[in-house]
Image (cartoon, helix red, strand yellow):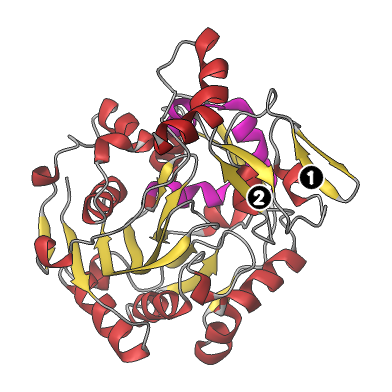
Amino acid sequence: MYRVSLVRCDTYGRPQVEAAVDRAIGLLGGMERFVQPGQRVLIKANLLWSSRPDQAIVTHPEVVRAVGLMARDAGGKVIIADSPGGIFSSATLRRVYRRSGLWAVADETGLTLNQDTGTVALPHPGGVTAKRFEMCRYLTQADVIISLPKLKTHSFMRFTGAIKNLFGVVPGLQKVGYHAKHQDADTFSEMLVDVLTLVRPALTVMDGIVGMDGNGPSGGDPFPTGVILAGPDAVAVDELAVSLVGMQPRSIPVLRVAARRGLTTLRRKDVPLIGDSFEAARVEGFRPPSTGPDLSRVPGFLSRWAARVVVTSPVAGPACTGCGVCREHCPVGAITIANGRAHMNPDGCIRCYCCHEMCPYNAVELRQPRLVQALMRS
């Protein structure tokens, strides 16, 4: 496994972020190790949907700015891109860029924001779940890919970081189709590792200055995690991030799949760490998702019953406006809109929590089954 650098940083103040990013990448040999003059550099941020930087849903613009300028100073031709949830259109991109603060970064620095919404099917002969993947066309125009994930929990995958960030190269609503095809955490993780081995980012820089705990990746709470992590191995970056916040790497489905494929041992001691002390950076009080156990290994004839009994279900709460975004993103059509509210069909629900993730009003609540509530009270 490649080395991972850990640099403590407690604020998004520009000088502090620039210094932390410069040190994190410098410990790995400097940006010149990853970017050569004249290369086209894709900065793949996490832009889940239109949200402010202080909500801790998207990669903070100061981190994007710092990495982008370092890549440009190394001689790269930089473009910043992602495919947010929803319709992959120029209007969607403009709205997300503006609210996330990246539009202002581009205005100030001259860094380019992607406006190409084209798609392309890319072959992946070594893929386990598929041999071809529908991807954003901007991916094919890059010589070097730098991934900038956000350190967050994920109600379905338990954690979203370096590996999960690459799912953003799947165009817009086509992500829904991947959820429909890969309905449990294990098979979805197999697909995510396929995407990782297809995209192969040269460098990952994780924004962990303020992460998100609880029921992320959009409905949790900002949590001060105080770190920048960087490394050429996305799996190793994720493994270190998970360990820092007190979660077990083996509890993360995508890391278990990566281990099965020989990409990690799931032992933190096997991740070479440079920079600041792991013990000094360790986070206390970080809450994992409350969505219940992973049922990937439960036999099919029992899994649906088990989901009803022990796994948290999405329910439209009082803030629901009936806008229909949740219905649009439900991969199995288990949501209807009636009388100005969303209604989730518990029998059809596969507990992927896309509705919770994409709700623009944070109106989808994750409710524990009565049995679990009773056990917690007893």
Q: Label 1: how many residues lie within 10 Å, few (<14), some (14-19) or many (20+)?
A: many
Q: Quadrant of the N terminus?
A: top left
- The main secondary structure of the magenta stretch is helix
Q: Is residue 134 left or right of residue 6?
A: right
Q: Residue at x 14, y 39 (%)?
A: 267
Q: Is residue 164 magenta?
A: yes
x, y percentage for residue 90?
Answer: 74, 66
x, y percentage for residue 344?
Answer: 73, 36
x, y percentage for residue 112?
Answer: 56, 77
Q: Quadrant of the C terminus?
A: top left
Residue on which disc 1 sits = 342
**Any part of residue 141 in sight:** yes
User: Which residues lie in the magenta part?
Assistant: 163-191
Residue on which disc 2 sits = 364
The answer to whether the residue labelled 1 contacts the one labelled 2, judged by CB atoms less than 8 Å apart, is: yes
Q: Is residue 265 magenta?
A: no
Nearer-the-camera pick, 177 or 186? 186
Q: Residue at x 66, y 50 (%)?
A: 364
Q: Is residue 155 left or right of residue 239?
A: right
Quadrant of residue 106 in the image?
bottom right
- Label 1 vs label 2: CA separation? 9 Å
Q: Is residue 197 left or right of residue 45?
A: left
x, y percentage for residue 271?
Answer: 14, 48
* Residue found at the very far right of the displayed protein: 339
Quadrant of residue 265 in the image?
top left
Nearer-the-camera pick, 352 or 119? 352
Q: Amino acid at mark 2?
A: Val
Q: Amino acid at mark 1?
A: Ala
* Residue found at the very far top of the displayed protein: 301
Relative height, residue 317 to residue 114 (above, below):
above
Q: Residue at x 43, y 29 (%)?
A: 190
Nearer-the-camera pick, 46 or 291? 291
